[in-house]
Amino acid sequence: MIETTAMAYVNMYGVLGTLENLCALDSEAQAILATLKKPVSLCFSVKNGPCCTFHFSREGCRMTEGDGGCTCKMSFSSPEAFNALIDSSKPGLPTKNPIQVLAFLLGPFTKLTNRLNDVLRPSEEAMQDRAFFEESTTLTLYTIAGAISALANHDSISKISADYTVDGDISLGIKDTAYITLRVKDKHFTTVKQRCEAPRAIMEFADLDLAAGLFAGKVSTINEMCKGTIHLRGMISMLDNVNRILDRVSVYLG
């Protein structure tokens, strides 16, 4: 079962959070940013849910927690209302600089999220292009990593696993491609989109093709672990708990 509030955090930190990486890696997203006349910092504030600001400029996108530094804000009456923005493009209520909110939301922001959707939910034909395949797989890793922390902190089932996870950093990555740090402190998970310097546990996929197969559910995790193509090291109990949360990620992200 999907919990609405947890879904709102997945949408904020997992889905929209990947805009940071899309703008860094994708040429079409960079072309959209190049049309900006000035930086825009758009805050999404959800009652009884997440609040984050996305800072857009010609140089890229950066996400921060809270509404600090926002130039415009859109508020949502509930997690359900925010999820409707992601699922069916239903906007919330502009509560700061409404003209800028609507102009940016209906223009560059929609173009960026449409591109993000194309990359994260690609057609089989698009995935035949190797460069696109690599970008899509890499960005999916970032989305999953954001969703892991969102669910560990807010999904009732995932929180059971989080409660049994000891403090420390977990390195999650695709060899020679992209790495994420899952930071655990007092049962709270934080996703840091940087390579871990001193991991207490490591989960590394051998290559992009393996990662893509795992993300699409086309490859057996157990089989690949037996073959050694999924490299596990360190505090294995931490990785066991992350794997249980990953099962929930697949439910939420479909």
Image (tube, grey):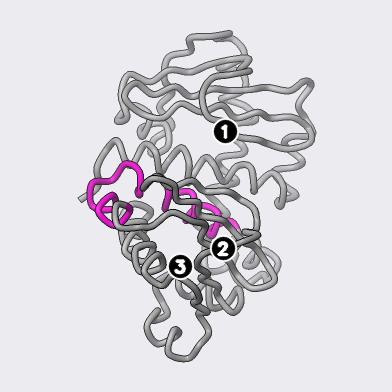
Q: Quadrant of the C terminus?
A: bottom left
Label 3 CA crowd tier, 10 Å (few <14, some 14–19, many 20+): some
- Distance between the alpha carbons at the discs numbered 2 and 1: 37 Å
Please state which of residues 186 and 39 is positioned toward the viewer in this rendering: 186
Figure disc tally: 3
Residue 191 image offset from top left, x and y in percent:
52, 48
Residue at left offset 51%, top offset 64%: 200
Q: Does residue 190 belong to the magenta stretch? A: no
Mark 3 lies on residue = 215
Question: On the picture, is 24 further left or further right than 250?
Answer: right
Mark 1 lies on residue = 110
Nearer to us of marks 1 and 3 is 3
Amino acid identity at mark 2: Pro
Nearer to us of marks 2 and 3 is 2
Residue 199's image quarter? bottom right
Q: Secondary structure at mark 1?
A: helix
Residue 238 image offset from top left, x and y in percent:
40, 64
Query: Which numbered disc, 1 or 3, marks the residue that appears first in the sequence?
Result: 1
Amino acid identity at mark 1: Thr
Residue farthest toward the left in the current orientation of the protein? 1
Instruction: Mark 2 and mark 3 in contact? Answer it, CB < 8 Å.
Output: no
Point out which mark residue 16 bears: none
Specify the principal SS of the magenta part.
helix
Point out which mark residue 199 bears: 2
Q: Which residues are magenta?
A: 139-162
Residue 171 image offset from top left, x and y in percent:
55, 63
